[in-house]
Image (cartoon, helix red, strand yellow):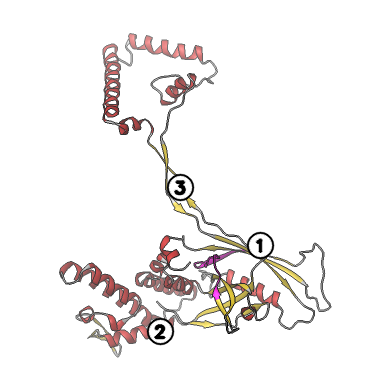
Amino acid sequence: MARKLATLPPIFYPEGINQIPYASYLKIDRVEYLAGLDIAAKASGQTEKLLTSGSAQLFGQFGNFVAGAFNTGVAPTAAQNQSLNYLNLQTRLSNKLSTLRQTNSFWTNAKVAEQQKALNENRIDDLDLILVTGITIDDPNDPSKQIPLTKAILKQQYKKHSNVSASHKKSSLSIALPNELQFGYGANWNNTFKIGTLAQAFASVGGLAKTGLIGAGGALLAGGAQALIQKYGGGNNPGAQILQSGAAGSAKAINAFGVNSSLSPLDPGGLTNIVGLGGLAPNENAVQFFKNVDFREFNFTFEIFEEYQQAEGFAERIVDFFKKGMHPSAPAGTGVLKFPHTFILTPMFVSVGSDGKVKETPHKLLPNTKACALTNMQVNVTPMNTIQTTYDGTFPLVTVTVTFKELTALTKEDLEGGY
């Protein structure tokens, strides 16, 4: 769902960097958690689309109500209840879509997908009329009565819901690119599958036949051993006791200290050791399968110069920008914490047209990010290894090192969406 973002004054360092010809800078947008997922979802963020779907929002609203009651003991407000009503309607309409697909051949998979997309994006005018027909809701003027749902009522419910979600703050920092900048991608292929000696069966029909013969021979050996046990018996049978005692005595004699490795052909480890005495090792025929991708991480170190009696106080504002976004808020009672803000990083370049006008464009090669968490921040007020301040107590040089980590893993569809 689109969320209206209340914008705070942006920060530019150096001043007016977005208007300096041929300048390269990093634009860092700081937004509340769900709003950050919304922005990423609009740029084809596949996982973000799931996290901001109607069903996820419904659970999220329940979570907010539970947390509010747990913290303060206050019941949900009327506006919050109206918001929940709209999300409930979305869920009911989604369920009806599923029913129509199962009971009506006219509702193909493509049509259901198109209608679900319109529902997720709150394009109420694009919804098929049959979707809202037959659904009743509580009368806003008299909750004891039921009234039929219409597109006009659905629009009213959405308007009330969007007003509840309109308090998300947005701020941005445009700062010169650091002197050292690098980034990388990681993919894990560490799901090891060992075909092992089964490769003999995979190799050919003859290999399969050999495997079968080996298996049959093993079964015969096992059957012979079982026959001996049955013949000589176990437990208190004197013959069995003699055999067992002799085996135990031999094992003790050749491995008095219990340090020898196994050489038993019946033990997989022992058979491996026997082959090893010949300078051979079993071929595991191992293959690596894809497992997952790493979450991208970005590290930046910014150098901030402060002039004596400078009114702006850039270092203080920039540090404040990061630390307020990094830490969670604690509602009354602090039974639960509200997620910290998320950050979206966009490298920018100021190009100059033939008419001499400057234009901000995304930087070539450098990647945009999905919604990121600020996981670490270090502020160094003594980068020259000595304390130096101006006459008003300002540190002339401050370095700020920050680490961002993306909240969701990158996929090929995300790259096609512009990340």
Front residue of this view, candidates 75 and 59: 59
Front residue of this view, candidates 312 and 259: 312
Between tags 3 and 1, which lies in front?
Answer: 1
Q: Is residue 18 magenta?
A: no
Front residue of this view, candidates 94 and 418: 418
Question: Is 248 positioned to the left or the right of 54 in the image?
Answer: right
Determine which residue is flagged by label 1.
Answer: 180
Determine which residue is flagged by label 3.
Answer: 189
Above or below 412: residue 353? below
- Helix, strand or loop at label 1? It is loop
Sequence-earlier tag: 2 or 1: 2
* Structural distance between the alpha carbons of marks 3 and 2: 49 Å
Query: Answer yes or no: do the residues labelled 2 and 1 have beta carbons within 8 Å?
Result: no
Look at label 1 and name its amino acid.
Glu
Give the magenta part as a residue range: 361-376
Look at label 3 and name its amino acid.
Trp
Image coordinates for residue 310, horizontal then vertical, percent: 76, 81
Image coordinates for residue 412, horizontal then vertical, percent: 42, 60
Sequence-earlier tag: 3 or 2: 2
Look at label 2 and name its amino acid.
Ala
Please identify the residue farthest to the bottom as the structure is shown.
141
Q: Quadrant of residue 79?
A: bottom left
Image coordinates for residue 199, horizontal then vertical, percent: 35, 32
Residue under the point 29% across and 24% down: 210
Image coordinates for residue 279, horizontal then vertical, percent: 49, 21
Q: Quadrant of the N terminus?
A: bottom left
Above or below 246: residue 33? below
Determine which residue is flagged by label 2.
Answer: 79
Question: Is 382 positioned to the left or the right of 262 in the image?
Answer: right
* Structural distance between the alpha carbons of marks 3 and 1: 30 Å
